[in-house]
Image (cartoon, rainbow, N blue to C red):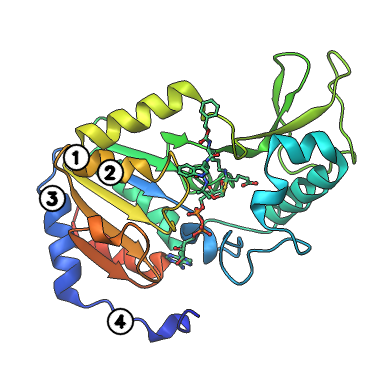
């Protein structure tokens, strides 16, 4: 069970060390997960609020579930898409957008497992979305991919071009990540001198493998999370508390 949010104390010394690691890096890469959006009200996957109608994400986010019961899977995604209408980026998203601005896109990469679009909504320009995006749909019969925002879709939406069933443009379990995006994320993990891992349980691969890549290539690694994770043993520094509070303090410390 997590502490109430006001219980966390991240001391100035730890923030100073993290800021020094960021300042000392020619290139910085960041990997975010559901925790970065938790303070916006988007439920995480593996928290106490992580079940949807009694289903674990592993039961509804697979191509097999979609084949077996596309209505159920669309119900899950339509509910998630509807949920996006009322959520907004939090100070953690804005701090990461400010960090990109400060370093420039040559020196900064933001890799996210999130599908909620909140990094872009906060002003991050170059976001590598490893697991797709909730707003997009793609056809199961033709190459059409469309951004449908959060508009309500039919129980079983069909493609306007070829009539086949549409699916969410999301990377489900057992599916490959988008090739170009993955290659760019791996490249960023290899080339950075500081890798910051924020709000992810770090159990879903291949995304979590980026931490190992960054470690292997010699980056200093910082974890920002409410609690330690499966990847904490790889960290040079852990800042434990809500990312929406820690990130603005950290980025502010870098000055302009
Ligand atoms: C806060 C906070 C606050 C909270 N501040 N922090 C064994 C070994 C290796 C791999 C596998 C394996 N067994 C199975 C696999 C494969 C599988 C996998 O990794 N499974 C694991 C569960 C073991 N991976 C796949 O299937 C991937 N594909 C693949 O491997 O393909 C092979 C292939 C190759 C070539 C051709 C064909 C196939 C695909 C994975 C796609 C995952 N997609 C999902 C679902 C999307 C559906 C959707 O969104 O609707 O993406 S899974 C789900 O988990 C979602 C997330 O992006 C992902 C990661 O979750 P995340 O972000 O870490 O969230 P949580 O909830 O787990 O953690 C939140 C964290 O935040 C916690 O730590 C909190 O403490 C913290 N927190 N509030 C800071 N305020």
- Which of the two discs, 2 and 4, labels the residue nearer the N terminus? 4
For ligand 1, tell me if the residue under mark 1 lies within 8 Å.
Answer: no
* Residue 105, x across and y down, in percent: 30, 33
Quarter where residue 185 is shown: top left
Q: Residues within 10 Å of mark 2 (few under 14, many from 20)?
A: some
- The first of marks 4 and 1 along the sequence is 4
Q: CA distance from mark 4 to mark 3?
A: 23 Å
The residue beneath circle 1 is 216
Of mark 4 and mark 3, the one earlier in the sequence is 4
Task: Choose mark 4 or mark 3, whichever is in front.
Answer: 4
Sequence-earlier tag: 3 or 1? 3
Q: Is residue 85 left or right of residue 94?
A: right
C-alpha distance separating marks 4 and 1: 31 Å
**Where residue 169 sits in the image (x, y, percent)?**
66, 32
Labels 1 & 2 near each other (Cβ < 8 A): yes
**Residue matched to label 2:** 212
Q: Residue at x 13, y 50 (%)?
A: 23
- Element on which disc 4 rests: loop
Is residue 105 visible to the viewer in this orientation of the structure? no
Question: Observer-nearest residue: 143 or 82?
Answer: 143
User: Counting other residues with Cα less than 10 Å from the Cα at mark 3, is it few (<14), some (14-19), or many (20 or more)?
Assistant: some
Nearer to us: label 3 or label 1: 1
Instruction: Name the residue tied to disc 3.
Output: 23
Per the rendering, the mark at residue 9 is 4
């Amino acid at each position: 069970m997590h502490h109430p949010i006001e219980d966390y104390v991240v001391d100035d010394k730890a923030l100073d060390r993290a800021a020094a690691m960021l300042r000392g890096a020619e290139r910085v890469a960041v990997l975010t997960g559901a925790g970065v959006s938790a303070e916006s009200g988007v439920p995480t996957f593996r928290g106490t609020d992580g079940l949807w109608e009694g289903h674990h994400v592993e039961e509804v986010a697979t191509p097999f579930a979609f084949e077996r019961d596309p209505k159920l899977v669309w119900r899950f995604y339509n509910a998630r898409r509807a949920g996006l209408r009322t959520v907004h980026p939090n100070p953690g998203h804005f701090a990461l957008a400010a960090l990109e601005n400060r370093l420039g896109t040559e020196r900064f990469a933001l890799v996210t497992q999130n599908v909620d679009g909140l990094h872009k909504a906060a002003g991050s320009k170059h976001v590598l979305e490893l697991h797709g995006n909730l707003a997009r749909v793609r056809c199961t019969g033709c190459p059409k991919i469309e951004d449908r925002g959060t508009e309500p879709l039919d129980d079983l939406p069909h493609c306007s071009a070829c009539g086949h069933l549409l699916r969410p443009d999301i990377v489900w379990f057992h599916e490959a990540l988008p090739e170009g995006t993955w290659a760019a994320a791996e490249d960023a993990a290899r080339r950075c001198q500081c890798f910051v891992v924020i709000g992810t349980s770090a159990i879903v691969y291949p995304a979590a493998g980026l931490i190992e890549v960054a470690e292997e290539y010699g980056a200093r690694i910082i974890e920002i999370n409410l609690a330690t994770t499966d990847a904490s043993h790889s960290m040079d520094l852990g800042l434990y508390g809500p990312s929406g509070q820690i990130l603005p303090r950290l980025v502010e410390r870098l000055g302009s």
